[in-house]
Amino acid sequence: MINNILLCGVGGQGTVLTSKLVAACAMEKGFSVMSAETIGMAQKGGSVFSFLRIAEGEQICTPMFGTGMADIIIAFEPAEAVRMLSYLRKDGTVIVNSRPVMPVTAALKASDYNGKEMLDYLSTKVGNLTVVDGDRICRELGSPRALNMILLGVAVKSGVLPFTTDDAVEAMKRSVKPQFIELNEKALRYEV
Amino acid sequence: MHKEFLMGNAAIARGAIAAGLNLICGYPGTPSTEVLETTAKNNDGTIYVEWSVNEKAAMEVGAGAAYSGARTMVTMKQVGLNVASDPLMSLEYIGVKGGMVIMVADDPGPISSQTEQDTRHFASFSKLPCFDPSTVQEAYDMIQEAFEFSEKYHTPVFFRPTTRVCHAYASIDVKDKEEYKENKPEGFIKDSSRWVIFPRLSYNAHMNIEERNAELSDIFSGYGRNAVIPATAAGCRKGIASHGISWTYVREVLRGKEAPALFKVSTPFPFPEKAAVNFLKDLDEVLCIEELDPVIERELVYVCGKYHLNTRIIGKLTGHVKTAGENTCDSVRGDIGFFMGWGLQDAELPDIELPDAQPELPVRPPVLCAGCPHRASFYAVKQAMKGQKTIFCGDIGCYTLGNAMPLDMVDTCLCMGAGVNIAQGVGRIDPDTKCFAFVGDSTFFASAITGAVNAVYNQADMTLIVLDNSTTAMTGHQPHPGTGRTMMGQVVDKVNIEAVLRGVGLTAVETVDPLQLDKAVDTVKRVAAEKGVKAIIFRSPCAVLIKPDKPAVIDPDKCIQCRKCINSLGCPGIIISDGSVTIDNSLCSGCGLCTQVCPVGAISCGKEAE
Ligand SMILES: Cc1ncc(C[n+]2csc(CCOP(=O)(O)OP(=O)(O)O)c2C)c(N)n1
Ligand code: SF4
Ligand code: SF4
């Protein structure tokens, strides 16, 4: 069986880092991993994604997968979850951060994009949906940099990924600067 | 051997190091950049690593090293090869002593490029062997084989991954240090009959090249990475030919299914003709799944003609596969489904019903960062030239994003360094237009200096604006001659842009900080009014490289909600929240530009804001 994971968000939100951590956890457990990232121009405020695939042995032949195949979508922004929703398999899980990121195009049109419409739509379409108030939790933890670990923590607890919160904490400790370990551990273990 | 999780580009670098790399040089460009950066990061001090000033310089530095017996790699993106094509086309005849791999990354989509050109054509045009990897592991292994081929045949070879291989990650097997090959270059040995190009030499070399390539075509037919796989579906007389990342999509779509015959082409040039005949001989119909141009498809049509095979070849040339853009698992699933005559069921269309009543999604074109000094520079020139007839010739870099609304300050953009010359051309035909050319600092050194000389020599009337943010920002912040840092970790004298411009004869050369808006606007007004070729250097560091200041604060009692800040600057750090104009603290870097634009002084920054 191949585990297909899709991370999406807006350039600068830290999806790439999160996908690397997921990969590290999976490799630690002896799985093979492939992933594909958006790198380049789109990172400047554009829509970005990471495709990640985890499996035993040599089953994975490509880092990408098609629509209807993601077991889980971890979305850093509500509209980006909707944009990538066609990739979700039937009965798949969606973890979404509720804070919208307003693009300049929307501000110029004086539109009041606030993500609510997107969350409403997701709740009608997705059975396994967890909306995370990342902004509030970040404030509670005292740092806006904790968002990716909060979302990853929720995703791990959903049981779709092939490793535990403890595994994620261990892998995190090996990959971040010492001064961020405490914050990240709290974020990973946060109970939503 | 051990396992590591590596990016494709990192795997290429690590593979090259394992193959005994002595020298690597290149010019940054997505998606190729990380190859050189990874080499620098893993350099034990035995490899010479250089960001050259442009691709032509890189190709020539690389050639010199390879003449001297070094294992050499030159890296660039596909359009970079256009710049390096002059040395390339002659180097083909001269050849090399040490193995030389020209690593050129193509970008189907295109995702971060001006063109969708296909380097496989450059390989056949320059008659140089070409390797086209399809996975991260294959990239790691194949780059080492590419060095062997290059050295054995005394010729540079191409290594041509595409974006989805360059930027894919995978857990792969990599060699331990003890398994690395070591290459000790013997140095340059004088021999003018070998290293000096003359018509006579070229004639002889041309003969030899054609002979060698015929031989290589045979050898490549037996090369393990060019695979012919018989059909697993009983009695199936169909086949699919593919390459690169598309090959992995084909495998993904066929997973667990009865498959037609398959042909994987990893060396598009010289084409493995015998392997192709072997693949085609019992087939009625072959589908070619390629990205960029139908290179394999044309070769197969040619092979069918040459060997009188009655196989129908379909793909881009027959309108069965879309001609532009990248392939995806979905597009390949559709192409194969149609080709195999699968019903919708077999094509495994997604289960979820979409997109009924999907809300309208915000569009997110890439934008200049909050706090980007380029925004201030564009705004200053726009204010200064208001009401006058102008043209703003842009160039390639982050500042190309100055084209977006509301700045709308890029009227042309063609290729690196073109803006300064296009401005002159427009001025010749339209003499009452004030002609401006905007160029980034890295682009200036790469290819705008000759344009400035051209303007001075030919008595043009124009203003050159150099946007000096002390880095090559667009491609991920590489150093360049103006930064005073090299990839060998040295701190060296900076090449001074003002001195270069004065040296070639510009009379007015002024430098100003664009974030001091009034001063910047005055400078532009004054300098642009002069005759001749003049330059303004807007100097302020890229916002990503400096520690952000405290975010700006909007005083809600003063703000009249006029939205001038949003509508004139388009900064992503200024948003509308619950109907009012607000600063997004997670993005704002406190550059202070908006405080100078607000008509009622409602925005404050730094000390005042506290
Ligand atoms: C011939 C060629 N080589 C490389 C590139 C890739 N590339 C895109 S922008 C850029 C340089 C941008 O640096 P700079 O001019 O300093 O502008 P900045 O991005 O810092 O604003 C490069 C090298 C290209 N487009 N064309
Ligand atoms: S990376 Fe630097 S130069 Fe590029 S848009 Fe951002 S601030 Fe501007
Ligand atoms: S320009 Fe000043 S007054 Fe107008 S919306 Fe912006 S902050 Fe408010």
Image (tube, grey):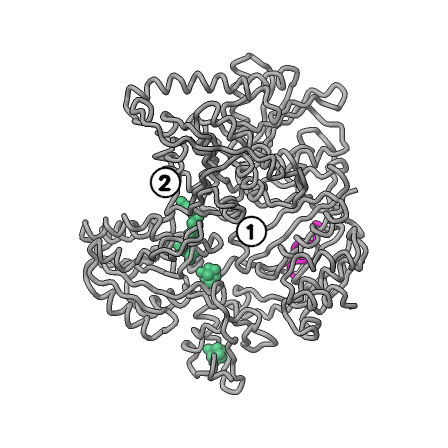
Asked if residue B471 lies left or right of residue B169, the reply is left
Asked if residue B500 lies left or right of residue B231, the reply is left
Q: For the N terminus of chain B, which image quadrant? A: top right
**Residue B515 in magenta stretch:** no
B472 vs B459, nearest the viewer = B472
User: What percent of the width, then of the height, locates residue B485?
Assistant: 41, 55
* Element type at mark 1: loop
B264 vs B360, nearest the viewer = B264
Main secondary structure of the magenta stretch = helix
Asked if residue A14 lies left or right of residue B425, the reply is right
Q: Quadrant of residue A100?
A: bottom right
Q: Are marks 1 and 2 on the same chain?
A: no
Looking at the image, residue B254 lies above or below residue A173: above
* Element type at mark 2: helix
Residue B246 seen anywhere in this rendered image of the structure: no
Magenta residue span: A78-87
What residue did someone put label 1 on?
A39
Tell me if mark 2 has few (under 14), some (14-19) or many (20+) residues whose alpha carbon lies within 10 angstroms of its own.
Answer: many
What residue did someone put label 2 on?
B56
Type of the residue with mark 1: Ile
User: What percent of the width, then of the height, locates residue B562?
Assistant: 48, 78
Chain bearing mark 2: B
Asked if residue B258 lies left or right of residue B217, the reply is right
